[in-house]
Image (tube, grey):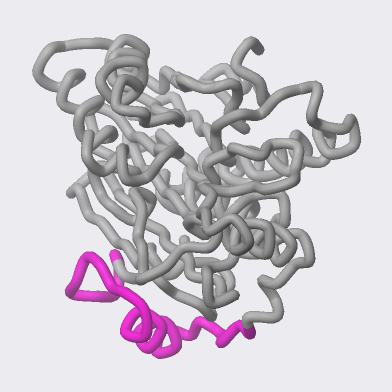
Amino acid sequence: MSFPFALAVHGGAGTILPEQMSAQLEANIRAALAQAVNAGHKILAAGGDALDAAVAAVKVLEDSEHFNAGKGSVLTAKEMVEMDASVMHGLQMQVGAIAGVRHIKNPVELARDVMHHSAHAFLISEGAEEFAFKQGHLFTEQDYFFTDRRYDQLMVLKESGDSALSEASYPDDNKHGTVGAVALDQQGNLAAATSTGGIANKRFGRVGDSAIIGAGTLAENGNVAISSTGVGELFIRKMVASDIAARMRYLGEDVKTASETVIHGELKTLGGEGGVIAIDKQGEIHFALNCAGMYRASIDIEGKLSIKIFANE
């Protein structure tokens, strides 16, 4: 039996306003989203696994300077990049997560390797990198991740003593920087992957929701796959991905109702700005956001490509 297949991606959510974005920047971002969703969809169309498709899509976004993950990651207070990622495969609810890595070009691939090749579910910092190098990942110098834009952003934040979830002095100043993908494959498997550079000027080894299964990432066959982006501390407190999945599982809510209820409910009341991408067992895709915009794209079960940035699209 062959199932319908579909895939969606996101590149962060928050205060993303059209009047603050140049035509060229918008075109570049839309092109990157299209490249990501097509990379994943190509794998699904060939009969490939949902997780491999999700990872392929996220990898494209990690390789772009336009998103806060991989190459485009923000800098910590110590002027370093520290990245987090997680993956989940819905068939046996397998997971892999990493946090605080500094020398891995594509953290989402390392998270998948943790799932496949480690007896553990979650590895951090030097230990995660030691495991990565044994798995054949190449040591990537911090210079690869360094950009003038991120350095200037950090200097502004250091002067004010603040931290930011992504941008400063940039068209999407208050965007929460995370990338992610969800997919349904022809075997009926659901999968999700999420990756981030965290928050700019962060201290003390902070880890957000992107690496936390049930907060930023979740996949459960026969139900739903979810990737989140937003104020990480609030998404952890409200267990956003798990809450959506539970509403669908126990209350019988559809993916739209469950996602909108959680994103616009207590999460928003507590100040949890952001959004989710979700796909259910039939391949129905929904984007829920409680802010001005979210970089997002999808190819649905009919093969229709959709790329959106602003909330009113």
Q: Relative to residue 250, is residue 118 drawn left or right?
A: right
Tell me the residue at 71%/49% (across/down): 66
Q: Nearer the viewer, residue 148 or 220?
A: 148
Q: Nearer the viewer, residue 137 or 122?
A: 122
Residue depicted at x 90% and y 37%? 24
**Quick check: 199 left or right of 66?**
left
For the N terminus, give its image quadrant.
top left
* Location of residue 96 with respect to 81 vertically, above or below: above
Relative side of 117 to 3, left or right:
left
Along the viewing direction, whichever of 178 and 139 lies nearer the viewer = 178
Total number of numbered discs in the rendering: 0
Residue 168 appears at what percent x and percent y? 67, 48
Q: Which residue shows up at 47% across the image and 61% down it?
A: 108
**Residue 232 quadrant:** top left
Q: Quadrant of the C terminus?
A: top right
Which residue sits furthest left? Answer: 250
**Region rendered in magenta:** 115-141
- Residue 206: within the magenta? no
Res 20 visible: yes
| 12 up-or-down from 249: above or below | below
Q: Position of residue 199 (x, y in %)?
A: 50, 55
- Is residue 117 highlighted in magenta? yes
Would you say residue 63 is visible in this rendering?
A: no
Residue 141 position, x and y percent, is 63, 85
Report which quarter residue 25 is drawn in: top right
At horizontal 49% and vertical 29% (from top left) the residue drawn is 6
Most extreme residue toward the front, as rendered?
160
Would residue 245 appear left or right of 272 to someone viewing this image? left
Q: In the rendered view, would you say 18 is above or below 117?
A: above
